[in-house]
Amino acid sequence: MLSAKFGIEIEFTGITRQRAAEVAAEVLGGTRNGERVTAPDRRVWKFVSDGSIRVESRRGRQAQAVELVSPILTYREDIDTLQKLIRALREAGGRANSSCGIHIHLNGANHDVRSIRNFINIIAARNDLFYKALQIEPDRMRYCKKMDAMLVGKMNQRKPRTLEQVRKIWYEGYAGNQSNHYHQSRYHFLNLHSFFNGHGTVELRGFNSTLHAGKIRAYIVLALALNHQALTQKSARPAKCQMENEKFAMRVYLNRIGFIGEEFANCREHLYMHLAGNAAWRYREPAPRRTTPSPVRT
């Protein structure tokens, strides 16, 4: 689950891109060239602008729209470094607001027709649960819409056998040049435009931005787990999961996809935080057992 390569884009404000690059150069031990930092392993970390970010500053500090674009990462080798950088950016004055998001790009090299259809159905089945758990800001809903029910229906009715057939269904109903980076089809929780448009990555866009290192780790692990499920599961259905007890539904699902053990306890906590219900019992916690006193012998 944790072996897949990924990249992450983290939007924030509160400081300038140059200041963010200075912080990254110090944390990574790399060399800065403007708003790019080359780490000792030759990987490049970039700080770019994004017009959707609402700029905010504190205490008169100069601020800009900042988007951290990571190089290709792997969880075991890079998560500690990434978290250290996130903490340093927050300490330097970086902050996320409701206009900021996080996008996680997953290596699409091993995906095929079956796994892409699985991914679509997995997200569709848990649209409501994910949106409640992740508390997606209203300001950002137009940039990470829920899975399109018509798209899901077409995928499952037509049962495409080639990636070209999947691609045609994905873009069906959209006008404009499909090679345009900012094509309207990309603005969904699951973005396959990046997969079909030459980048070869499956993108998950349904995360509010934060500079809380623990939350970002939870989002990355969730993305990697969803990716692994799509790749390894024989098939997936889009049927909606039960929602009468949200915490229990999320707990069962997270256990199923690999969030097991003490290592992921903190990740589970972040993903349960905004859900209602009881994680231990599906319907209600059982009442305490009544004990009947033994009859007294005379």
Image (cartoon, rainbow, N blue to C red):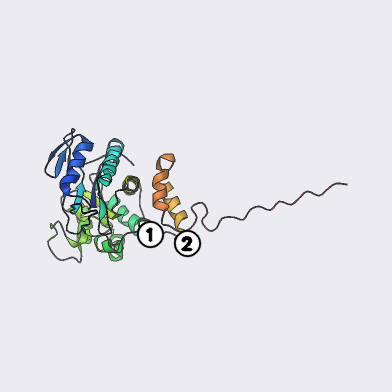
178 sits to left or right of 247: left
Q: Secondary structure at mark 1?
A: helix
The location of residue 132, given as percent across then percent down, is 38, 59
Q: Earlier in the sequence, mark 1 or mark 2?
A: 1
Q: Is residue 102 above or below residue 258?
A: below
Farthest residue to the front: give it: 59
Mark 1 nearby-residue class (10 Å; few <14, some 14–19, many ≥20): some
- Please tell me which residue is depicted at 78% across the width and 48% down the height of the picture: 294
Q: Is residue 114 above or below residue 127?
A: above
The location of residue 61, given as percent across then percent down, is 20, 52
Query: In this view of the protein, which residue sits in the foreground, 185 or 78?
Result: 78
Query: In this view of the protein, which residue sits in the foreground, 167 or 265?
Result: 265
- Please tell me which residue is depicted at 62% across the width and 56% down the height of the picture: 287
Farthest residue to the right: give it: 298
The location of residue 248, given as percent across then percent down, is 47, 54
Query: In this view of the protein, which residue sits in the foreground, 77 or 98?
Result: 98
Q: Secondary structure at mark 2?
A: loop
Disc 1: which residue? 132
Examine the rendering and report whether any part of residue 247 can be seen. yes
Amino acid type, callout 2:
Glu
Disc 2: which residue? 244
16 sits to left or right of 121: left
- Please tell me which residue is depicted at 18% across the width and 45% down the height of the picture: 19
Examine the rendering and report whether any part of residue 259 can be seen. no
